[in-house]
Amino acid sequence: MSLVDNILKLTPYSGMVGQLLPWQSALISLAVVFVATATAQVIYRRATRTPFQPAGKLCLITGGSTGLGKALAVSMAASGADVVIVARRQTELDVAVKEIEVKKLNASQIILAVSADVTSKTDIVRIFDETKAKMNRDPDYVFACAGKLVTESLAEWSHPSLSFACKSLLGASYPKMFLDHTMEDFDFLCNLNYLGQAYIAHQAAKRMVESNIKDGKIVFISSVLGIMSFAGYSTYSPTKYAVRGLADTLRNELQRYKINVHIFFPGTIFTPGYEVENQTKPNVTKVIEGAGEGQTPEECARSLTKGLEAGNYAITTEFITELLRTVGRGVGPTNGFFSDWILSGLGWIVSSGFTFYMDYLVRNDSTTN
């Protein structure tokens, strides 16, 4: 007896048992399984979703002196959180603290700045030790926003006396064609863009467990180039894929400690570093990217907080990135069963067309920069 017949026996339509054609029974069975799966996932998401309530929490934000990190710090302070911002340059930290202070919800909130290098394991430990000493507690929410270019001009960027390691503060996109890179470039970007976030997450999770913090949050910052990639990003994109792999692992593993993990896939963020990046970017990379719309750091921060409030694991900023997220979701949680199912079909079509387009451009590109 089929699944449908067993269900019909429990309804007023029991007289139809055995009357359906095989294809009708199969179609109804698929519909039942689909609806049951969707319902179970909705119930599971609602039962396990942790509210995002910054008020009264301690938020630690790396890369917090500029860009997305500073915009997030302002947003968290305006929501009533105590905030610790981390960056290398003390002068930029001092300026950022003043900007954040005026956005506090109440006078009792504390804004702390820590000057540190997130690629240094010693500095990572010091960040949390200093936070604990001055705030008398460990962070509830940790945002790994490190990603700020520090070159002020193309001349400074290109000067032969400037080592590659000095060309970035806390993270970087350094577009070049693969064969134009040195092997040292790969070392540096891996240390900066991946290990910098891995170190922060490791220490954050350790402190949260030691302090018995429940419903803590660790938020990784990847990129749309952590979902898809193309010519020009051979050093940058792999590090952002690596961040995603770490986030996927910890999302599952840290549930035993009730620590929530999220990952953010922003597109273009308009910062001074983005302008410098464009001056060194290969022509074919610019053509593939097109004149896509970007966001200000403040707009990106709003997209991220909106996703956290919705309880989403993977958070994007624009429709195209959302399509790509659903196509390459893997085994992570959906942001909505039906919406992800519909978008993934459309995303498959869009991504297939884009693959053809970018391959055509690269094959027919005659420039070297």
Image: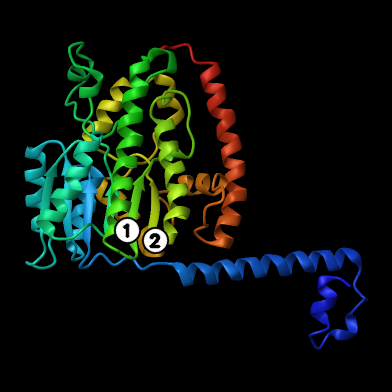
As drawn, 19 above or below 54 = below
Q: Is residue 173 visible?
A: no
Amino acid type, callout 2: Tyr
Callout 2 secondary element: helix
Q: Is 265 placed left or right of 119 in the picture?
A: right
> Which quadrant does the C terminus fall into?
top left
Which mark sits nearer the N-terminus, 2 or 1? 1
Q: Are marks 2 and 1 in contact (CB under 8 Å)?
A: yes
As drawn, 6 above or below 103 = below
Callout 1 secondary element: helix
Q: What is the distance, in whole Å, between disc 2 and disc 1 at their CAs?
A: 7 Å
Q: How is the image coloured?
A: rainbow
Q: Nearer the viewer, residue 177 or 121?
A: 121
Residue 292, x across and y down, in percent: 40, 37
Return the residue at label 1: 209
Q: Is 142 placed left or right of 354 in the picture?
A: left
Q: Is residue 18 visible?
A: yes
Which mark is on residue 257?
Answer: 2
Which mark is on residue 179?
Answer: none
> Which quadrant does the N terminus fall into?
bottom right
Q: Is 278 placed left or right of 138 in the picture?
A: right
